């Protein structure tokens, strides 16, 4: 029997992952073992992980709000803390009134829109991202649930959505430019900088989204943006300056901070 046809023992995988600095080596070994289709693929996956590739890129998927989200190399990996943003969006919708009109900007893998569609059952979902690799990945993840467009923020969206959007998800990049080099190598090296770098103070993309959001939101519609705890006050002010009613919600458990901006008016934005 050739070496390529002999599966690596669990103990060997754990040892190699620990030596490479993987804190959760036992858990990662189980995931890799359960994903690999054959011994050769298993060995290749372990090699990629020990070389520093993010676990989700090695597996080809990330778990997000109970879903397996396809994540290709070079695509931003959805973070567990961002589940809190989707939770807030779910709480702001009333499915009994009909499908919510949802826009997911900076959609990356499409995880947020896919998770919201799964939670609500029916939505009119429109997602966009500037990265071609992300768009290809998102189209796989939201297939059958919505449309994915390639372009900068609102630019590629159909004009017919203006004034109709009930939920506007925007997981914008918010790491200050000078802090990007301080990120773990898994993010800094293997994820697109455009998905991480938020400009000098981390709020450049948020400012652009907030400035345009009132023209796209329906009366009573909501903008939801993730940010950091230290940026929360300035992010809230930015959203409020656009004419939206702004508030900050947090989750200590997920270490998550979300700014919600609501367009004044009657109705709930559907």
Image (cartoon, rainbow, N blue to C red):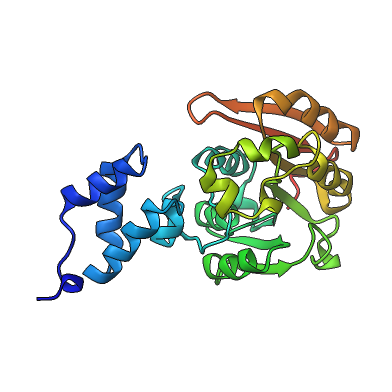
Q: Residue at x 84, y 41 (%)?
A: 207
Left or right: residue 72 versus residue 198 is left
- Location of residue 103 (image quadrant): bottom right
Q: Is residue 61 above or below residue 213?
A: below
Q: Is residue 31 left or right of residue 265?
A: left
The answer to whether residue 38 is visible is no
Q: Residue at x 23, y 44 (%)?
A: 15
Residue at point 79%, 33% (across, down): 201
User: How many labels, in total?
Assistant: 0
Tell me the quadrant of the picture where the N terminus can be found: bottom left
Tell me if residue 203 can be seen: yes
Residue shown at 62%/67% (left/top)? 133
Q: Is residue 268 above or below residue 100?
A: above
Q: Position of residue 84 (x, y in %)?
A: 55, 37
Q: Position of residue 191 (x, y in %)?
A: 59, 53
Q: Position of residue 18 (x, y in %)?
A: 30, 41
Q: Residue furthest bottom?
A: 1
- Find the residue positioned furthest to the left: 1
Pinpoint residue 263: horizontal percent, then vertical percent: 83, 40
Left or right: 140 with respect to 15?
A: right
């Amino acid at each position: 029997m050739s070496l390529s046809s002999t599966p690596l023992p669990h103990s060997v995988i754990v040892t190699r992952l620990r030596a490479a600095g993987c804190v959760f080596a036992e858990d990662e070994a189980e995931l890799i073992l359960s994903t690999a289709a054959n011994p050769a693929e298993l060995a290749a996956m372990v090699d990629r992980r020990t070389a520093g590739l993010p676990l989700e890129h090695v597996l080809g998927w990330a778990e997000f709000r109970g879903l397996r989200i396809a994540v290709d190399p070079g695509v931003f990996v959805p973070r567990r803390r961002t589940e809190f943003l989707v939770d807030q969006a779910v709480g702001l919708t009333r499915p009994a009134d009909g499908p919510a009109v949802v826009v997911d900007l900076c959609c990356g893998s499409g995880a947020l829109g896919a998770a919201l569609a799964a939670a609500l059952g029916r939505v009119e979902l429109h997602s966009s991202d500037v990265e071609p690799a992300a768009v290809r990945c998102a189209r796989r993840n939201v297939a059958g649930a919505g449309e994915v467009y390639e372009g900068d923020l609102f630019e590629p969206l159909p004009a017919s959505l203006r004034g109709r959007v009930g939920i506007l998800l925007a997981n914008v990049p918010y790491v200050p430019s000078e802090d990007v080099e301080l990120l773990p190598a898994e993010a800094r090296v293997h994820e697109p900088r455009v998905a991480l770098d938020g400009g000098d103070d981390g709020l450049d993309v948020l400012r652009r989204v907030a400035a345009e959001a009132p023209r796209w939101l329906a009366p009573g519609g909501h903008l939801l943006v993730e940010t950091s705890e230290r940026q929360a006050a300035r992010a809230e002010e930015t959203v409020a300056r656009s004419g939206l009613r702004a508030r900050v919600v947090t989750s200590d458990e997920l270490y998550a901070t979300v700014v919600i901006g609501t367009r004044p008016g009657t109705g709930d934005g559907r």
